[in-house]
Image (tube, rainbow, N blue to C red):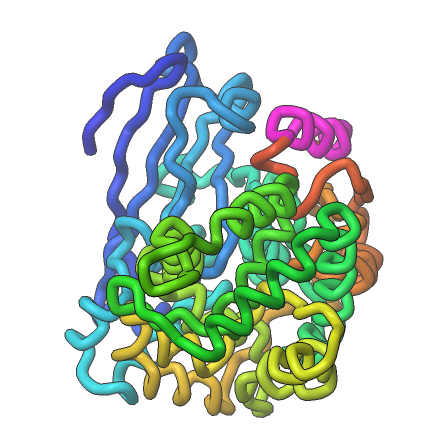
Amino acid sequence: MSSYRQPGVVLTDRHFTVPLDHTDPGGEQIELFGREAVARGKADEELPWLVYLEGGPGFGARRFVGTEAWLGRAVEEFRVLLLDQRGTGLSTPANRQTLPLRGGPREQADYLAHFRSDNIVRDCELIRPQLTGGAPWTVLGQSFGGFCAVRYLSAAPEGLKAVLITGGLPSLDAHADDVYRAAYPRIERKVAAHYARYPQDVERVREIAAHLAEHRPESAGHRLTSEGFQSLGIMLGSGNGSHQLHYLLENAFVRTPLGIELSDTFQEAMRTANSFAGHPLYALMHEAIYGQGKQPTGWAAERVRAEFPQFDVATALAGDGPVLFTGETIHPWHFEVDPALRPLRETAELLASRTDWPELYDPERLAANQVPVAAAVYHDDMYVDTEHALRTAASIRGLRTWVTNEFEHDGLRAGGPQVLDRLLALVRDDV
């Protein structure tokens, strides 16, 4: 354990050991990493704890510098633990380099089956007494972190003083098919809004998609395809994503001695945006987080996409309509074009076909909930369906919602202090 200072905060790096399989506490152990943050003037005070669960799945906790974003508001009254969930960041990372230590694809898939919200919550419950002396703590869950928080309310509410959720109320019973069946129309609306804002992008996108379909260039081992280009639509779910996508598109082509080609600038930006090298668990576990019961997820986003032919690039290019972006969807081709995922293709197939996922949520326990809960629901959220979120909110006793279109899914990042302050105000009377 080491401590050091940044502007306004004292940071302490903490390491924890937890079982890979919590049903076998004496078996294999893995390491978790968390970074404690406390206001410099309060480092020696007894403060309540807040644990932050990042969105994803597959992302380590954000690396703040000082008191930026919402952290500055949080350390006014909490000692904060920024937890790298299992397999992410510095918590026994799971990726193409480390997973072969498990064995072949079957062993890798069995290992990763322990990396969902149920075990993330069990990890938290082992860590909590070590930090709080047994006192309950407050959970702040962003996106997938909110999914974990709802699991926490279902499985271990005694560990919770309060729960704050931003853009992360999951459906309690929707299959992955239902999730993506609701997602594609939302994505289409976001694309339409982008084209209404930047009508010049309609033709530019068609030109880029046609060029990629014909040439399929490579950048640093990453195959650049028209489907991969479509997936840049994930940017449309953030507050300034539409503008950033427009700026990326305007640098697409350059004149060379061989004619018009895609610029190095564009190819590098597309490769970087499409790469899962920094967060492979997002691709591997993205549909598994919805798995409950015996029905496999079975590449739900790919299968459901067939119900929305307007997203097919070839069909769009054969006609005169716009090429639609996608986003927040993972497909088998991701494991063919991305060198960070290519060695994990068979592992991903085994996860997609798995039929023994444990149930994640307890509707009866949630209906009897006693923990103060507040949730920011972003009305135009591209990543989490608003209807699903509000149905879940109504199923959790006492949950207070703040429904807003002031922010997109990244509201906690874009409006951090304001968002956190609003949620704390909603639960304060009951905390």
Is 153 left or right of 354, judged from the image as shown?
Answer: right
Count of number-bearing discs: 0
Tell me which residue sits at (67%, 49%) in the image.
167
Q: Nearer the viewer, residue 260 or 366?
A: 260
Tell me the quadrant of the picture where the N terminus can be found: top left
In the image, residue 95 above or below residue 46: below
Instruction: State the residue lying farthest toward the front.
Output: 257
Is 313 left or right of 104, judged from the image as shown?
Answer: right
**Figure quadrant of residue 395:** bottom right
Residue 405 visible:
yes
Tell me the quadrant of the picture where the C terminus can be found: top right
Q: Position of residue 31 (x, y in %)?
A: 24, 55
Residue 367 visible:
no
Q: Position of residue 101 (x, y in %)?
A: 15, 74
Q: Nearer the viewer, residue 343 or 369?
A: 343
In the image, residue 88 above or below residue 163: below
Tell me which residue sits at (41%, 36%) in the image.
81
Q: Position of residue 30 (x, y in %)?
A: 24, 61
Q: Nearer the viewer, residue 82 or 176?
A: 176
Is 196 left or right of 43, judged from the image as shown?
Answer: right
Residue 326 covered by magenta stretch:
no
Magenta stretch: dominant secondary structure: helix
Tell me which residue sits at (27%, 86%) in the image.
105
Tell me which residue sits at (58%, 71%) in the image.
360
Instruction: State the residue lying farthest toward the top.
Output: 41
Instruction: State the residue lying farthest toward the left.
Output: 101
Q: Position of residue 185 (x, y in %)?
A: 77, 69
In the image, residue 293 above or below residue 218: below
**Figure quadrant of residue 9:** top left
In the image, residue 148 above or below residue 313: above
Please state the extent of the stretch shown in magenta in the rendering: 415-430
